């Protein structure tokens, strides 16, 4: 479904059309198979020589044999990789017309499998066509994966997490990564003292992978303690973490000492404190073992630091005459002098977007709150930076359905959409309309069966996403 919209610029009369698209998957389609933080810095590696060749357009192509019939494909040099598996990566086939460029693409695809060290091609000419011959040299492949010493976790579970199977390229780095995945699995199961040694597979040309495992005891948490906490009581902090204790032996299950989970819990506590203005909060942990037992006590050590308060709140970028600083600031829950509260700040940000700008057709408004730390300890200023964008009214409405739309009248979705052509678009109504579409039980909402119903907004001068 598409809606046409007219943007209104309040200081001059200029109009442009815009579309909202609604992708609907009808119920009949479900019966058929269907279809804000900073990221870590990417890791860049020097490309291989073969990759540089293909990035520059590929090797020079001799087109002398193009258009001739392929009489057959001969593969020589393969020892462990079947001809069928090699051909499955190729589009060049017997009884097809030959294309030299396609053969080069096939060779590139074979290299991408990491199963081959070298591939040479040759063309043998015959009066009625050609034969393609590939002379290959294989990379060493894994012949067997062995786990020794495991008693609590069976081989099938270890193989699933290991990620290495017979027939995979024999790569020492892959074996080291598999070793780390297995260690993480044991820690998830409470076996933090597990030790895994790679006996075979971590040296070049070793084709068998052999892991020697000492599982160690299954550790369980007897008690969880907190020290240094003043803002929250211990009972409250326990509800903010995922690790659970045994209530001093009363609950014998659900209390595995998962080292990874404990470290994640420490980070959750830091995020909790910082969301309430304790920006310098630090949380560590220590594990103490009971004598002659697999029980442990976990203690989270908290340094809350100073809680920051808001000295001043300001707004920049608001140019729409109706939305004065006094009006917008007066609607906020977080006030000057209050302790910083991330939940209140987010609520105020959303209120500015939906209750003010979104209500009056500013569907692309961007509002970003920014904390400015001051020289005075424990104080900050809060600035809401607003990029209003244009103001839009609705125009034409178009529907796009995927599946057997004959079973669904086109008026059905229109009755669920609270958008009126010629009126300003209200983001609150737009979001409520999309929720009604998903809850109507008319359209498919399972993403495994197809795309759930959605309202798609775009400018009319852009290329339509659906026709």
Image (cartoon, rainbow, N blue to C red):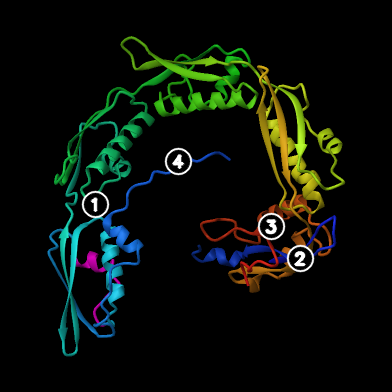
As drawn, is 230 to the left or to the right of 242?
Answer: right
Question: Which of the pair 153/242 is nearer the observer?
Answer: 242
Disc on res. 187: none
Mark sitting earlier along the chain (3/2) = 2
In what element is the residue under mark 3?
helix
Given contact means CB atoms under 8 Å apart, are the residues at marks 4 and 2 in contact? no
Question: Which of the pair 404/455 is nearer the observer?
Answer: 455
In what element is the residue under mark 4?
loop
In what element is the residue under mark 1?
loop
Mark sitting earlier along the chain (4/2) = 2
Marks 1 and 3 sit apart, C-alpha to C-alpha, by 46 Å
Residue 185 at what x, y percent from top left?
Answer: 35, 34
Marks 4 and 3 sit apart, C-alpha to C-alpha, by 39 Å
Disc on res. 437: 3
**Which residue matches tag 2?**
16
Given contact means CB atoms under 8 Å apart, are the residues at marks 3 and 2 in contact? no
Mark sitting earlier along the chain (1/4) = 4
Residue 5 at what x, y percent from top left?
Answer: 76, 63
Neighbour tally class for label 3: few under 14, some 14-19, many 20 plus, Cα within 10 Å: many
The answer to which image quadrant residue 263 occupies is: top left
Residue at 22%, 42% in the rendered image: 172
In what element is the residue under mark 2?
loop
Marks 2 and 1 sit apart, C-alpha to C-alpha, by 56 Å
Image: magenta residue range: 83-95
Residue at 28%, 64% in the rendered image: 108
Picture quarter with the N terminus? bottom right
As drawn, is 417 to the left or to the right of 102?
Answer: right
- Nearer to us of marks 4 and 3 is 4
Q: Measured along the vertical axis of the image, is residue 47 above or below residue 39?
A: below
As drawn, is 175 to the left or to the right of 223?
Answer: left
Disc on res. 168: 1
């Amino acid at each position: 479904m598409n809606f046409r919209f007219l943007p209104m610029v309040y200081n001059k009369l200029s109009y442009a059309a815009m579309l909202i698209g609604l992708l609907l998957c009808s119920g009949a389609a479900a019966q058929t198979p269907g279809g804000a933080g900073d990221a870590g810095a990417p890791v860049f590696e020097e490309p291989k020589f073969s990759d540089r060749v293909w990035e520059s357009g590929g090797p020079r192509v001799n087109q002398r044999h193009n258009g001739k019939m392929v009489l057959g494909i001969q593969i020589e040099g393969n020892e462990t990789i079947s001809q069928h598996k090699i051909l499955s990566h190729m589009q060049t086939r017997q009884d097809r017309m030959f294309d030299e460029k396609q053969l080069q693409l096939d060779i590139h695809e074979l290299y991408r499998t990491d199963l081959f060290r070298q591939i040479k091609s040759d063309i043998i000419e015959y009066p009625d066509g050609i034969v393609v011959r590939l002379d290959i040299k294989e990379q060493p492949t894994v012949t067997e994966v062995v786990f020794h010493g495991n008693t609590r976790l069976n081989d099938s579970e270890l193989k699933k997490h290991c990620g290495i199977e017979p027939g995979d390229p024999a790569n020492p780095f892959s074996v080291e990564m598999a070793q780390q995945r297995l260690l993480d699995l044991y820690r998830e199961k409470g076996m933090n003292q597990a030790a895994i040694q790679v006996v075979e597979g971590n040296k070049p040309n070793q084709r068998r992978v052999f892991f020697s495992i000492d599982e160690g005891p299954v550790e369980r948490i007897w008690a969880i303690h907190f020290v240094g906490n003043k803002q929250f009581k211990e009972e409250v902090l326990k509800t903010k973490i995922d690790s659970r204790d045994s209530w001093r032996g009363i609950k014998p299950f659900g209390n595995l000492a998962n080292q990874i989970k404990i470290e994640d819990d420490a980070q959750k506590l830091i995020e909790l404190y910082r969301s309430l203005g304790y920006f310098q909060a630090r949380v560590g942990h220590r594990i103490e073992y009971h004598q002659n037992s697999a029980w442990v006590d976990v203690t989270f050590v908290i340094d809350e630091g100073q809680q920051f308060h808001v000295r001043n709140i300001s707004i920049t970028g608001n140019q729409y005459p109706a939305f004065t600083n006094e009006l917008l600031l007066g609607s906020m829950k977080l006030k000057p002098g209050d302790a910083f509260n991330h939940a209140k700040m987010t609520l105020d940000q959303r209120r500015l977007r939906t209750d003010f700008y979104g209500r009056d057709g500013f569907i692309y408004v961007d509002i970003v709150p920014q904390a400015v730390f001051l020289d005075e300890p424990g104080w900050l200023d809060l600035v809401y930076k607003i990029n209003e964008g244009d103001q839009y009214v609705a125009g034409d409405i178009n529907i796009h359905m995927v599946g057997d739309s004959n079973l669904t009248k086109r008026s059905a979705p229109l009755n669920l959409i609270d958008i009126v052509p010629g009126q300003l678009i209200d983001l609150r109504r737009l979001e409520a309309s999309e929720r009604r579409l998903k809850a109507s039980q008319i359209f498919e909402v399972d993403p495994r069966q197809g795309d759930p119903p959605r309202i798609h907004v775009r400018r009319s001068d852009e290329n339509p996403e659906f026709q």
